[in-house]
Image (cartoon, rainbow, N blue to C red):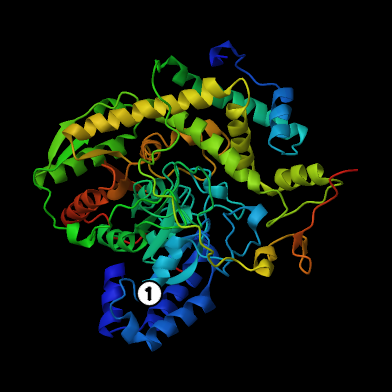
Amino acid sequence: MLAFDMPPALTRDDAARIAALAQLDLSDDELDTLARQLGDILAYAEQVQQIDTTGVAPTASIVTRHAVDRRDELQPSLDRDTALANAPDPALGAGLFKVPRVIG
Amino acid sequence: MTVREIRDAIRSGERSAAEICRETLARIDAVNPLLNAFNTVAAERALARADAIDRDRDRHRGAPLAGVPMAIKDNICTSGLRTTASSRILEHFVPPYDATAVSRLEAAGAVVVGKTNCDEFAMGSSNETSAFGPVRNPWALDRSPGGTSGGSAAAVAAGLAPCALGSDTGGSVRQPSSLCGVVGLKPTYGRVSRYGLIAHGSSLDQIGPIARRARDVAIVLGVVAGADACDSTSAPEPVPDYEAALTGDVRGVRVGVPRALVEQGVDPDVASATTAALDVLQARGAAIVDVDLPHARYATPVYYLVSTAEASSNLARYDGVRYGFRATGADLRAMYGQTRGRGFGAEVKRRIMLGTYVLSAGYYDAYYLKAQQVRTLILRDYDRAFERVDVVAMPTSPVPAFKLGEKIADPLQMYLVDVFTVSANLTGLPAISVPCGFTPGPPRLPIGLQLTGRRFDEAMLLRLADAYERDTEWSTPLPPIPSR
């Protein structure tokens, strides 16, 4: 789908759909403001559609040389208590992060 | 004092690291309440470290930063020292490890004095998105210091630290350096390890030094640059002696000026200061050459499509499970949504929303893929320009420091401030901002010249900046901060 096929403005429902994808709980006021602001920003960004990019490869990263291989050797790492130290609800003895229930 | 002066005074035994540290902390104590440049001042830790350097003077005699106080942007992890990214969601986060840039600074003898305020998760252009209040520009307290490394730039400008680390995703080292009248460098992508830098846009982020002199930036870059096993995008290219590159000789250096790009929308004082700066370089023997960067004017929309897409992905990790703020929720999904909805500020939420949108089914090709293709065209423009010139020169910011509150209500107006800085991040090229004048005032506000170079040619940028400083006095004055 091409961007210029889209309506220029986003609705509150559009914003709510995006917020759900992003796991953001937002108030109705926030959704209204964001719908307007994202609409403005996307309208501004429409100018990139004018550029002919036929046959142009996308650039996702400008790293040209990779040297990522290393020997698969055990390295020192954080101990378990340190890794849990910043958790809002750690189970220190068990070495777990606790979360609210997932399945009702 | 400059980094070099402090280093030399401590090496020679003329000053102790503890003395320098106490003076720095006293100045922070006196001035920071006016500026809000620091989120955290690490006084005890810094004094202990300075004492250790003094006790073990022999071991630190050759250290390139022995006893030099250093401010670290608060999105760069410091082991045991709170690191917030100026966000409520990380307000009480204490990293269990150091960023590689920080561990290299400390191994070189630097003394971390505190963590500097910034825009939340380095998203903004004015420092006003910080959850802990804006930083004030030391040249005019009712104005923005720029962003996102506004605390780092303001701290250096006001003499609260001789040097600071910032991070630059779309101009966040260079633009505040320009607005505060200090030197700031965004290195080539891969030149400095990103390990321990809180991720914003992973293909764009670089850590860079801010100081009062190009020489100081060169010294610090030499310490933090180089390959790192903890960052697979860090580059294996050898690190040259940047200080040795500061010869003052710029004869025959070709400086390209993209006139079509800079002839519109630039404040007249900024435009005339830029022209005058080019005259200074020309008088030293550099050649000024016209270059064309036809796609650079699309860099801002491309940047905001690419960077928000990357940010929306990177910030998915803030879910209230492993670290940071957690809101209560009846079940896991409710906890996620509440944690993120309440933990993030308005600009961060806006960017997560925009990035999620441009990556979502149906819009990916039109926005994200298209932006990546135009990114390629911008890269090609620069490649072509560097066949003819050694650096490209333009203003760092189209405007001097603007008033706090002036742009924050309109996100798009704020984004347009980044027009000249974002290209270096999209292309991965190194770029420096060097002070090149002041507005006539009042208030007198600093203006910065930006030089962009070839990949891994930071030495050329530093050589030009240093040579320029030798003929000008723009880096010398301290701002007229009222004393308490």
- Above or below, B142 relative to B35: above
Nearer-the-camera pick, B258 or B410: B258
In the image, residue B301 lies at what x, y percent? 46, 28
Nearer-the-camera pick, B199 or B217: B199
In the image, residue B119 lies at what x, y percent? 54, 49
Q: Residue at x 64, y 68 (%)?
A: A79
- Above or below, B195 relative to B452: below
Horizontal side of residue B389 vs B205, given as left or right: left
* The N terminus of chain B - image quarter: bottom left
- Residue B471 visible within the image: yes
Horizontal side of residue A37 vs B470, given as left or right: right
Nearer-the-camera pick, B196 or A69: A69
Kindly identify which residue carries mark 1. Answer: B109
Give the chain of mark 1: B
Q: Residue at x 49, y 82 (%)?
A: B48
Nearer-the-camera pick, B289 or B198: B198
Horizontal side of residue B59 vs B116, given as left or right: left
Amino acid type assigned to the residue bearing label 1 in the image: Gly
The quarter of the picture where residue A5 lies is: top right
